[in-house]
Image: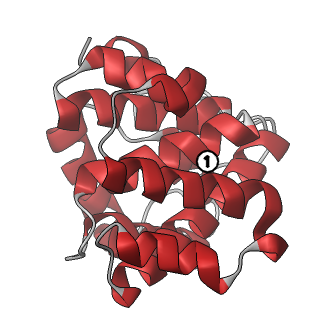
Amino acid sequence: MTDQKMPTALDLPMVDPLPPETQKYFDICVEKLGMVPNVLKANAFDIEKLNAFTGMYNDLMLAPSGLSKLEREMIAVVVSSINRCFYCLVAHGAAVRQLSGDPKLGEMLVMNYRVAPLDLRQRTMLDFAAKMTTASAEIEEADRQILRDAGFTDRDIWDIANVTGFFNMSNRVASATAMEPNDEYHAQFR
């Protein structure tokens, strides 16, 4: 690793040397993203924790789903906006810009998703994610029915809930540890 800056305020250095499988994963990140995301470096003090994090992230964000990759990134940004998670807003805001091809959409979602020109499906999905983030105990069958009426299946609702829950957890860990987003994210896809 050329960048030795600590990704968080915690003194938890990466395992050195990294296991071959982990090094290969990091090399793929550099090849595809031009960097190793700091969230991965932050978790690399314990390879089992890193593997658990990446396994869950990859399943929720990249595996086949009734939600598009863009929709999942939109959830990440809206949840992170409500939680004011600097790391995730920067990283996932860049992903929204990339996947949508629309830098303005990324900024709108970061600031206030309600001003973005969203279709009914996207608006309903993000309203549910916002409610789950701020008042999950108040979710009722009527909230799930609104999603169904917008075209989501029960499996899609499961995915919306899990992506929302994952980012609520990740936001809290990132904020609590002062996780810094990679500088590269700031200029991407603008």
Q: How is the image coloured?
A: secondary structure
Q: Position of residue 16 (x, y in %)?
A: 52, 56
Q: Position of residue 133 (x, y in %)?
A: 72, 57
User: Residue at the spot x=33%, y=75% of the render?
Assistant: 152
Is 171 or 50 nearer to us in this picture? 171
Q: Secondary structure at mark 1?
A: helix
Q: Position of residue 147 (x, y in %)?
A: 44, 71
User: Residue at the spot x=34%, y=37% of the render?
Assistant: 118
Residue located beneath label 1 in the image: 79
Q: Is residue 169 left or right of residue 89?
A: right
In the rendered image, the quadrant that contains the C terminus is top left
Decide: is 59 above or below 173: below
Q: Is residue 54 left or right of residue 103?
A: right
Is 145 or 73 nearer to us in this picture? 145
Residue 4 visible in the snapshot = no
Decide: is 120 above or below 125: above
Q: Position of residue 141 (x, y in %)?
A: 63, 85
The quadrant in which residue 161 appears is bottom right
Decide: is 9 above or below 107: below
User: Residue at the spot x=20%, y=52% of the render?
Assistant: 28
Label 1, residues with CA under 10 Å away: few <14, some 14-19, many ≥20: many
Decide: is 91 above or below 183: below
Is 112 or 61 nearer to us in this picture? 112
Q: Is residue 124 left or right of residue 30?
A: right
The quadrant in which residue 95 appears is top left
User: Residue at the spot x=62%, y=41% of the render?
Assistant: 80
In the rendered image, the quadrant that contains the N terminus is top left
Residue 152 visible in the snapshot = yes
Is 39 or 154 nearer to us in this picture? 154
Amino acid type at mark 1: Val
Q: Is residue 74 left or right of residue 142?
A: left
